Image: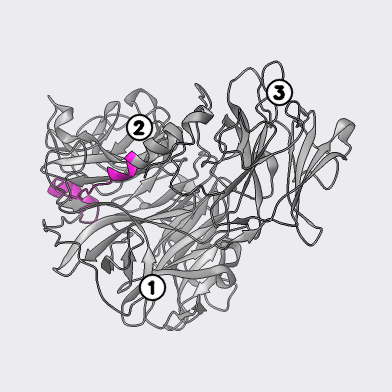
Amino acid sequence: MKRGSKVFGVLALVAAAASILIAAEPNDHAIPTQAELEAAGLDSVPPAEPSARAVVKSNRATVAASLIVQEGDTPAGAPGPVTALNSPFTNGNGVVGFTGSAGENFVWYDTGVTWLNSDGLPSVLTGGEGTMGVSNTGGFIYSPSVDGNDSVWTHNGLLLTDGAAAPGFPPPALNTFNSRPTMLPGGASYWVAGVSLSGGTSTEARVLYGSSDSTPATITRVLASGDMVGGFPIASGSNGIDFDYHLSDDASHHIHSLTLDTGSTNDDGIVYVDGAVIARETFPTGGGDNWDNFDNVSINNAGNYLFSGDTDGATGSDEFIAYNGVISIREGDAIGGITLASTASVSTLSLNNLGHAAFIWSHSGGTETLFFACDASDLTASSVAVLSVDDDVDFDGGGPDAVVTDFNASSAIGPGLWLAEDGRVFIEVDLDYGAGPVEAIIALDLPSCGAADLVVNEIDYDQASTDTEEFIEILNPTARTINIDNYSLELVNGNGGGAVIYQTIDLPNVDLLAGDYYVVCGNAGLVPNCDLDVSPDTNLIQNGAPDAVGLRGPTGALVDTVSYEGDTGAPYTEVSGVGLVDDPAIDFYSVSRYPDGIDTNVNNVDLSGRCNSPGLPNFGATIDCIMVPVELMSFTIE
């Protein structure tokens, strides 16, 4: 449970220090004119000086937010104050990246600037397109001008530049532009490029390129003008491969908005998913009208996908968002207490690997609202309004700090929004502190999903030799306080696939606050942040193959259960516990939920072996684990 003013060791101190370093960063689109034309005109944002951060007094809704960076800040690694910012993107761990400008263009990763255009010398890098990507290891891709040529550049250096030979095409084909780059968590890069088949400077074809390790040696042609799709070739010229495309984090699924050469402009637009045509202009939607055009797309590791666009139906209901090819929300619908009155339109959308969705609609005379849905398969029922233009944001818990005056989302430049798996959504906005708008990247904590009750968040059941540091951590992932009296932990022997309870631990009368932890251990002298010391001191939790820990609620129902090292008998396994192992050969190691509190009701998806962190948020490290001594966890800062 929460421990007042106590500081919980080195990890907490590092996290606190990191939070102080939050700064601001820019977004500059100064790329060559030809590239601007090819990439549909990336515009720059003029510098602005933020006003003093006086509290904004209003009757508007106030939404808690984290400020990542804004114009006027001088972040770590930047040569000067931020003058512009671009769309945020995250990797598989929820770490944010984007490009911007602060005297020169930069790449941001996590808490600061990690790359400047000048770092590319002797190559001369200028500008930087708003679309980019970051990997789990800090790799990046973006699209600056390199020595005057429109290019893509990664942490490994130059990937491709216009005027170079076009990979995957026979001579004399040349590359003519490079745009809309993305990077997957594993480090693979993808982007849209132009090709002059005749060796000139005009774009005669488009191609989606990929590079498995973000180096020129592995560039491959993924999809290109002339490829046959649904019985027709992808259109040539500057059409065909649209800038709206998305790949799942594991690269196993892909979705594209494409233009085919059908002989007519009326039916040439399609949505293409994993090799199949899902929707085509003039073809029935299944809702009494026909598909008309398509724009935003997103797909996840499960192969589920979202796309938006228009139908040829009545203007009051033609804009839509579709899930897996079926329209879920239409213009005119009421969602989250807001009616999407005509002429409502979708600005951007994002689907994560947990099946959650975030999207922005412009509605009611141009008002924009960010919505979040815990269940993307049922957007109408599960969507809630999170933040609207003219709402206040509160960065420090002390009341309104600034007014949101605009969402900078645009399918023509960058999504302006990215939904991570760690319960946050990152958005590019304009803020007004009272002296005019400044650009900013902010993060919002989203409503809890799939967590109606407590969860078993971490289990350390096995150490080298005698098990003396065992613990079970419970997390309250909800938005409410839960009294844990009348809850109990059940320790289950799953020998042979059975389910025999060998110990029941009744929990005390304690109010567990929203987002807080409760640690049950065998020896509080060896386990930091232990809230309840139970017997025995050693070998408290059995070592698996398989075994389980269940959490039973006040109604007598199991509210959560974790089976490890295999599948314990019903009802103590959520789908599968195969592969969940607390390796005793690794010190300070446990089976834990990552991201913290994730609960899709699949044990070996939600949990994995990682460095332990009793009473603290779980984190991604799997090697070089350390445990802060108990005596260092108990000092108090007055």
Q: Amino acid at mark 2?
A: Gly
Which residue is more in the foreground, 243 or 223? Answer: 243
Judging by the rendered image, the residue that carries numbered circle 1 is: 345
Neighbourhood count class around disc 2 (C-alpha, 10 Å): few under 14, some 14–19, many 20 upward:
many
Most foreground residue, 399 or 225:
399
What is the span of residues highlighted in magenta in the rendered image?
A: 17-41
Q: Distance from label 1 to label 3 (Cα)?
A: 59 Å
Q: Quadrant of residue 135?
A: top left
SS at badge 1: strand
The answer to whether residue 391 is left or right of residue 532 is left
Residue 58 x/y as whole percent: 28, 78
Q: What is the count of numbered marks?
A: 3
Q: Which mark is residue 139?
A: 2
Label 3 sits on a secondary structure element that is loop
Instruction: Judge left or right: residue 46 versus residue 263.
Output: left
Select label 1 or label 3 by which is in front: 3
Q: Is residue 596 above or below residue 44?
A: above
Is the stretch drawn in magenta largely helix, strand or loop? loop
